[in-house]
Image (cartoon, helix red, strand yellow):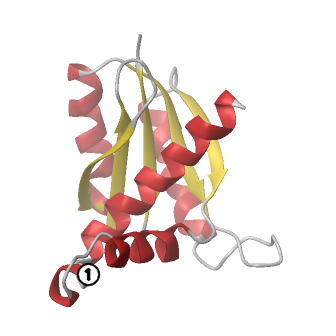
Amino acid sequence: MSRILAIDYGIKRTGIAVTDELQIIASGLTTIPSETAIAFLTTYFSKENVSKVLIGEPKQMNGEPSESTPIIEKFVAAFKTAFPEMQIVRVDERFTSKMAFKTMIDSGLKKKQRQNKGLVDEIAATILLQDYLTRKMI
């Protein structure tokens, strides 16, 4: 089988998570500078069989698009141009960063480790992906 990849795209950093080949478990892959995302994905897709990519969709509490939506949409357009055959699923990313931070606290990470914003982005991408997998199985 192929993997599913999740992207938590941000202005500065992008968190990336991926499933195992059986699409059961989501794991954090890495955090990269956002301007390198397409190049990173080009290399990754050449090495791994990925059938679907989840891209976070930022929304406000009332469901309206957030202020970062234009930045994400620009990335989505670039992604579609670079990878026209890749299936994209947009997923609501509300609360993922807060959930990621809480996960870091609950797992016992020290305050200095919790200040690593890159780790927050990677965990947020993992939460996006695991939530998708859970909903898919219901």
> In screen coordinates, is 50 left or right of 43?
right
Q: Is residue 6 above or below residue 53?
A: below
- The residue shown at (67%, 76%) is 66
- The residue shown at (44%, 62%) is 124
Q: Nearer the viewer, residue 118 or 114?
A: 114
Q: Is residue 26 above or below residue 87?
A: below
Q: Quadrant of residue 62?
A: bottom right
Identify the element where label 1 is drawn: helix
Q: Nearer the viewer, residue 86 or 117?
A: 117
Q: Picture coordinates of residue 55 (x, y %)?
A: 54, 48
Q: Which residue is mark 1?
A: 114
Q: Picture coordinates of residue 20 (x, y %)?
A: 34, 27
Q: Amino acid at mark 1?
A: Arg
Q: Picture coordinates of residue 67 (x, y %)?
A: 63, 80
- The residue shown at (50%, 44%) is 129
> In screen coordinates, is 109 left or right of 4?
left
